[in-house]
Amino acid sequence: MDVERPYWNMEMEPLLNTPQIEQIQFEKLKRQLAKLKAGAPYYKHMMEKNRLDPEKLSGFTEFRDKMDIFSKSTWREMVDAYDGDILKALDQRIAISVDQLDWMATTTGTTGAPTPYPMTNRDLQEFWAEYEARGAWRAGVRPTDRILHCFALSMVIAGVTAAIGFQKLGALVLPVGAEAKSERILMTQNLFNATVYIGTPSLAEYLIEQAPKHLGKEVGDLGLKILLCGGEPGAGIPEIRSKIENAYGGKLFDMGGGFGFSCDHEEYQGMHWLMDDLCYFELVDPDTKAPVALEDGARGEAVMTTLENDGWVWVRETSGDIVQVFTSPCPCGRTGFRYKIVGRSDDMLKIKGVMVYPSHIKGVINEFVPRVTGEFRIILDEPPPRVVPPLKLRVEYAESLEPSELEMLEREIMEGMSKRLKINPKILWAEPRSLERSHYKGRIFEKLYESI
């Protein structure tokens, strides 16, 4: 194996975001639609209703015009139609029997039916593991590395199947999991000297606090040189990137929001989309769902279609992520158009007509570290997106801060919010370490309306 080659897949990755890849995508799309028409009742009905013949498909425009977008609400309606039987609903969407599946992962499913990620072994190895190998290789992970896998292992897509997927590189995977909590995670690292951390950025931040407590060492002394972070905002926020990289003495990479990985350029360029040959990417208007041209600087909601899979079937499926894409060449020189996640459609807040996402607020808060810890909560009295001003933020100040300094710090934070986000929030101070830390995804909202 040539460990110096620039890409994991030297056949396909040089073609990403080029005209050559479009023909590959189109031929695969026609075959996938034909397979679904023959074996997936939900899509067969849609194609017959909209008069789409996969063999005579004229192009991507016809595909977008005749195949409906599939959203979380679409999935919930399907599950409800089958009296909550997820497997029966799933059987309508895939061209193979659910009895032929080998793996099942899901989202956390905190608000209703979880989104399933059904996979055959082929899906796992040739799609999911292929994405992970492409991204990790670009980040510098090699077969001689040891990977401390800290995403939750309990059914979530970034868990067991991801741990198996990263092994495709040949590296040693230590699947300790977020459920193990910080003490065991740190103990495992101390014993096995992993070189790569994989997990949420909020857990990476939390381990900075916990390493001296449990090991008597700083995280920078533990040998982790590459940090692959995803599952939530953070890795793309400059202030958080700086905090984590300085503490660990390593390089932080952002991943997710589809099938992307950030590059090693010194300035964050967004995530490179790595899967043109295996997943077709679109942008749509978040409100109207009308197509948005994939041009440099364009913004919209990400929509994806898998092109070869058996079980992990997405056909124009919305991710809920609002992204900005960049089709111009990246200064790192690597292939793949880039995208930055602006926020999630589910998390958007509207304050006097101004649209704000939690990641934007987190970015401003982290400008004031170390006077604040970086932990905060958005307090909602009513269901979003509309917020009656002022937006209330519970912000945790640092132990080193004197009470007499809070008034000045509050004014500075509010000035930062006004200048960068055009909002004037109300700051509610929280004592140091009083806000609960999470080993999973960091908690952002306090939904007071749910307790009424």
Image (cartoon, rainbow, N blue to C red):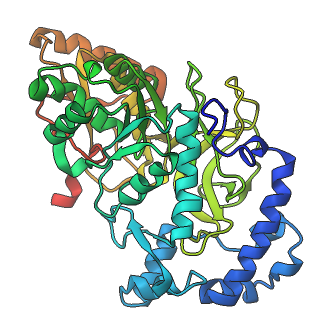
Residue at 31% across, 47% down: 441
Residue at 48% across, 32% down: 253
Q: Position of residue 335 (x, y in %)?
A: 72, 37
Q: Toward which corner of the image does residue 365 lie, by quadrant?
A: top left
Left or right side of 137 for 285 = right
Residue at 82% across, 67% down: 27
Q: Position of residue 303 (x, y in %)?
A: 62, 58
Quadrant of the snapshot with the N terminus: top right
Q: Position of residue 445 (x, y in %)?
A: 28, 46
| Position of 305 relative to 441 (above/below) | below
Q: Position of residue 132 (x, y in %)?
A: 52, 48
Q: Toward which corner of the image does residue 409 lie, by quadrant?
A: top left
Quadrant of the snapshot with the C terminus: bottom left
| Position of 391 relative to 309 (above/below) | above
Residue at 45% across, 75% down: 102
- Foreground of the two, 347 or 264: 264
